[in-house]
Image (cartoon, rainbow, N blue to C red):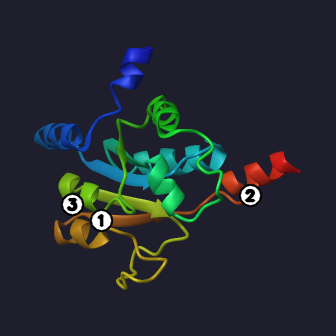
Amino acid sequence: MSLSNIESKIVSLEEAVQIRNSYNWKGESVVFTNGCFDILHTGHVTYLAKAAELGNRLILGLNSDDSVRRLGKDVNRPINSEDSRALVMSALQFIDLVVVFDEDTPFEMISKIVPDVLVKGGDYDEDESDKKSKKYIVGSDIVKENNGIVKTINLVDGFSTTNIINKIKS
């Protein structure tokens, strides 16, 4: 895959909605997930590959740098800029589109894309309905109201960006 092909997978929300509609016309199901994906590792790749298996197309919502900072992670996060993270993520063959979002949650993106499948890691609960719960999956109500499904994927033990950063520091 050429660099221009990789870069073409990074799109605005408006472009993603148009492309999502074309997938719909072709009868292709759309999976959506989101996250920071600061330092790509085995846990990320495994999670994303499994998410991609749940449909025909995978759209990734990527937290902007400001959005990552507001999540209350370490003051030096993200390590990699949103442009760098978007390029790395779009290089993964099973990701069809990468959309950077600046909001605290991907709610707006999910409400416009309306994926057929919404996926989060196993630290969330696909059946949680209390929006104040840390286990609640943002946008799950929209997906379910539109006959979509919400799934969680078990995380790979021992792999996290925080663990990698701590290992480098020590």
Amino acid type, mark 3: Ser
Amino acid type, mark 2: Gly
Which of the two residues, 167 or 21, is positioned nearer the viewer here? 167
Pointer 2 residue = 158
Disc 2 is placed on an element classified as loop
Within 10 angstroms of label 1, few (less than 14), some, or many (20 or more) residues? some
Between circles 1 and 3, the one closer to the viewer is 3
Picture quadrant where residue 143 is located:
bottom left
Residue 97: x and y, percent?
Answer: 34, 37
Pointer 3 residue = 111
Picture quadrant where residue 17 is located:
top left
| Rendered position, 116 above or below 65 | below
Q: Which mark, by number, is residue 149?
A: 1
Disc 3 is placed on an element classified as helix
Residue 71: x and y, percent?
Answer: 51, 63
Q: Please give left or right for residue 51 compared with residue 81 in the image.
A: left
Question: Which label's residue is closer to the chain start, 2 or 3?
Answer: 3
Amino acid type, mark 1: Ile
Residue 120: x and y, percent?
Answer: 45, 62
Residue 75: x and y, percent?
Answer: 64, 57
